Amino acid sequence: MTAAAADTPASGRGGRNRAEAVIDLDAISANVARLRDHTGGRDLMAVVKADGYGHGLVESARAARAGGASWLGVALLDEALQLRRAGDSGPVLSWLAVPGEAYTEAIRADVEVSAYSDWQLAEIVAGARQVSTRARVQLKVDSGLGRGGALPADWQRLVDQAATAQGGGLVEVTGVWSHLARSDEPGHPSIAAQTAAFEAAVAYAQSARLEPRHVHLANSGGVLASPSTWFTMVRPGIAIYGVSPFADGASPVELSAAMTLRATVALVKRAPAGLGISYGHTYTTERETTLALVPLGYGDGVPRHASGRGPVVVRGKRFEVAGRVCMDQFVLDVGDAIAVAGDEAVLFGRADRGEPTAHDWAVAADTIGYEIVTRVGARVPRAYVGEVAR
Ligand SMILES: *Cc1c(COP(=O)(O)O)cnc(C)c1O
């Protein structure tokens, strides 16, 4: 038991600070600025949907604007309206709607909306008529993602309908856009194929005398690695939070991780050899050792799939989750390392500080870094740091 820790709590944080996600807003601003430089100063639409990928919708938006994002992109109209309520008055595009969507609110709030189909465009026109205000619309073509948007076979009809509506004064088509299926695989032939299909769709819109000012295709993977996809504007999400979209976790542009997920070790105890750890006893201590209890679990978004694998740093040493991740907690076997209750445990943060990254957790859980940061739960308080936060 020589090097082993006593179970005496470290002073300071105590139980008041079980865990937190520290969000460095300056990192978001810096990432946006670097991505803009990388794309030759093109317009940049920072994607802040899903609570800013877990980093906070309004805070991320403010940081992105400070870094030079002229646009914000969100999936839901509710998210756009939340930005407006928080005082953001700049250009915002929202792109996922259902029949009966509250377009009147969007139009009144000066939120640009997307149209994928003729019935959707008809709803937008009806909304514009109701509030006697011209709706600004961006048409989305499915250039090969096979998800939202109008397929090429339906594109001409949508464009023609939009041109008619624009002639009637109820809508203004400000943009044409699409989304990539495999931008995380630079050089994949689907990128060139989608780019060509997109160019054809834009050309048709122009021939129908729409004059879309904003022509955009690239999400993070395209922004980082496929310049042919940049057009007039780029639309990065994950990269602005400092997480790579690529399978190897690398990035050709320096990115700073914005989120650090940390917890306060709740309990440390010396344990005998042969002790089964956590539900199902999928891990058993091999010899007398020290266990540290970390008070975060899948109820906080720590993936249960990372059981036995997720990396955690305590006092500068890296350990892996021992046994199963539970709803509220998991265990580390720190061997004979020093640890006391109250120590800081960092699940992920900055590689340049020797911390594991969201990408490391993605590998451990067989998922992507997007899911790791976005699923950090509402139970985990966010602490904002950086100049932008002040
Ligand atoms: C989420 C999303 C983005 C951002 O994608 P990243 O891969 O995070 O950069 C861009 N465009 C659309 C339509 C999206 O849904």
Image (cartoon, rainbow, N blue to C red):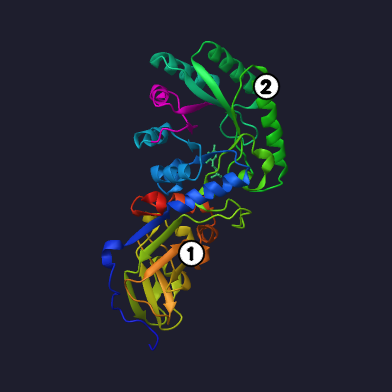
- Cα distance between the residues tagged 1 and 2: 50 Å
Question: Which region of the structure is painted magenta?
Answer: 88-116
Q: Residue at x 58, y 44 (%)?
A: 36
- Of residue 334 and residue 348, the one placed in the foreground of this image is 348
Q: Report the amino acid beneath label 1.
A: Gly
Q: Which residue is mark 1?
A: 310
Spot the residue most to the bottom: 2
If you read the primary sequence from the N terminus, does the residue marked by circle 1 or circle 2 appear first?
Answer: 2
Judge depth for marks 1 and 2 and give the one in front. Answer: 2
Q: Residue at x 47, y 32 (%)?
A: 91
| Residue 67 pos. (x, y %) | 49, 45
Q: Which residue is mark 2?
A: 204
| In magenta stretch: residue 101 | yes
Q: Residue at x 69, y 30 (%)?
A: 199
- For the residues labelled 1 and 2, say whether their Cβ atoms are less than 8 Å apart: no
- Of residue 324 and residue 18, the one placed in the foreground of this image is 18
Disc 1: residue Cβ within 8 A of ligand 1's nearest atom: no
| Residue 54 pos. (x, y %) | 43, 49
